[in-house]
Amino acid sequence: MAKLWLSLHVLSAILLIGPMTVAASLLPGRVRAALTEGAGAADPPARWLHRTCRVYAVLGLAVPAFGLVTAARMGNLTDFWLIVSLGLTLAAGVLLATWILPAQARALALLDTGPGADAPAAATSQTALSQLTRLSIVTGIFALLWAVVVVLMIVRPGSTTGA
């Protein structure tokens, strides 16, 4: 039964966390391109990327749930590598919920007030571009957190059950 839970955990991580991480990473560049091209509010890809992040964030809650069930079945709940992985997962989730998703919404608001929406060119100002740069950096950190979790799940430092 542990193999079934492990399979569900790995599949859900690949199918839910992966696309969300990619969408989060692509959104700042898409918004910047839409502002530069003057597409403004008529840029469905940027909105689709944000929606992907929101939906997959909720669905992605299954990943740690399956992981905890798997760890309980395998008797790994107190292993250091698992505790660190859970902490990093929590950090990634908090970062997504409190910083990335709200920043994405603010970035999409730039499209509503940008050059394509017949508003002043303030949306392409240095402030707007620096907001997008910060969002890019934070989504990079988000992706890095997931990369470290994957490495910990594979290497399992200190594990007595082998890798």
Image: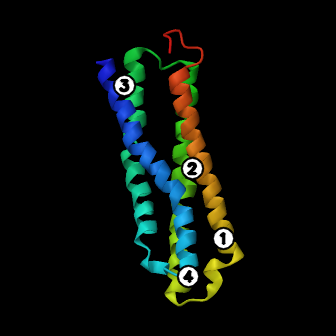
Q: Are marks 3 and 1 in contact (CB under 8 Å)?
A: no
**First in residue order: circle 3 vs circle 1:** 3
Query: Between marks 4 and 2, how big is the CA–CA gap?
Result: 27 Å
Disc 1 is placed on an element classified as helix
Disc 4 is placed on an element classified as loop
Q: Which amino acid does label 4 sit on?
A: Gly
Q: How far from the left and from the top, in percent, is residue 125?
A: 68, 78
**First in residue order: circle 3 vs circle 4:** 3
Using a 10 Å C-alpha cutoff, classify the residue at mark 1 as few (fewer than 14 neighbours), some (14 to 19) or many (20 or more). some
Using a 10 Å C-alpha cutoff, classify the residue at mark 3 as few (fewer than 14 neighbours), some (14 to 19) or many (20 or more). some
- Give the total of numbered labels: 4
Query: Between marks 1 and 2, how big is the CA–CA gap?
Result: 21 Å
Label 3 vs label 1, nearer the camera: 1
**First in residue order: circle 3 vs circle 2:** 3
Q: How far from the left and from the top, in percent, is residue 142?
A: 57, 47
Q: Residue at x 56, y 89 (%)?
A: 119
- The dot on residue 95 is 2
Disc 4: which residue? 114
Q: Which amino acid does label 2 sit on?
A: Leu
- The dot on residue 6 is 3
Q: How far from the left and from the top, in percent, is residue 2?
A: 33, 19
Query: Between marks 3 and 2, how big is the CA–CA gap?
Result: 26 Å
Q: Which amino acid does label 1 sit on?
A: Leu
